[in-house]
């Protein structure tokens, strides 16, 4: 930090001895060293808080990315299941053709209703998953905040 050699320390000690006096010099040295230690602790605390905030931001960004990836995967899987189901229905209905336009219209309406119900169920599942992820993220954030609010268990000795 400072480029102070032995000679400079001796000169500072002699000047301090002459200015402050031999009775008060040990107390003055003690006081100066306490202030220096407090400054060091303060700088270290600030440094630790900044590093922890940077780490928290990185963790939150990672959680957001993984949540988005999970949502995309769930959506693609749901669409794939709908496609397979539709293909299966078409293959089983291919043997017997409906007799009238009215029957065709009714079957289409039924299929639309089923698809809407399936989409609704998928949305509910996604919402539940998102709520669980949010709760988990909130728990992690609270743990991180509790870790910040209790940085050191012991008080510094002065």
Image (tube, grey):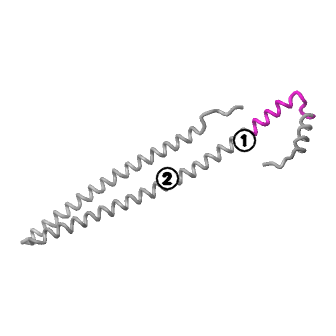
Going by the image, does 63 lie left or right of 26?
left
Image coordinates of residue 3 in percent, x first then y, are: 83, 49
Q: Which residues are magenta?
A: 18-36
- Residue at the location (20% across, 64% down)? 112
How dense is the environment of label 1, judged by Cα within 10 Å: few (below 14), some, or many (20 and up)?
Answer: few
Are the residues flagged by discs 1 and 2 in contact, CB closer than 8 Å? no
Image coordinates of residue 96 in percent, x first then y, are: 8, 71
How dense is the environment of label 2, judged by Cα within 10 Å: few (below 14), some, or many (20 and up)?
Answer: some
Does 23 appear in magenta? Answer: yes
Image coordinates of residue 69 in percent, x first then y, are: 41, 60
Kindly identify which residue carries mark 1: 39
Q: Is residue 80 above or below residue 126?
A: below
Going by the image, does 42 lie left or right of 83?
right
- Residue at the location (41% across, 59% down)? 68
Does 27 appear in magenta? Answer: yes
Going by the image, does 128 lie left or right of 60?
left
Image coordinates of residue 44 in percent, x first then y, are: 67, 44
Q: Secondary structure at mark 2?
A: helix
Q: Which quadrant of the structure image shows residue 113?
A: bottom left
CA separation in Å, label 1 and label 2: 32 Å
Kindly give the residue lying farthest to the left in the view shown.
99
Going by the image, does 46 lie left or right of 10?
left
Kindly identify which residue carries mark 2: 60
Q: Which quadrant of the structure image shows residue 42?
A: top right
């Amino acid at each position: 930090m400072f480029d102070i050699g032995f000679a400079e320390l001796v000169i500072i000690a002699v000047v301090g001895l002459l200015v402050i006096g031999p009775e008060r010099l040990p107390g003055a040295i003690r006081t100066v060293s306490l202030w220096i230690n407090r400054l060091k602790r303060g700088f270290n605390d600030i440094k630790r808080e900044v590093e922890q905030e940077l780490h928290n931001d990185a963790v939150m960004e990672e959680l957001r990315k993984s949540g988005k990836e999970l949502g995309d995967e769930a959506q693609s899987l749901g669409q794939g299941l709908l496609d397979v189901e539709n293909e299966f229905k078409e293959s089983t209905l291919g043997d017997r053709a409906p007799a009238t336009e009215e029957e065709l219209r009714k079957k289409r309406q039924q299929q639309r209703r089923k698809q809407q119900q399936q989409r609704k169920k998928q949305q509910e599942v996604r919402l539940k998953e998102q709520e669980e992820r949010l709760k988990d993220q909130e728990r992690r954030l609270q743990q991180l905040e509790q870790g910040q609010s209790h940085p050191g268990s012991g008080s510094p000795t002065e």
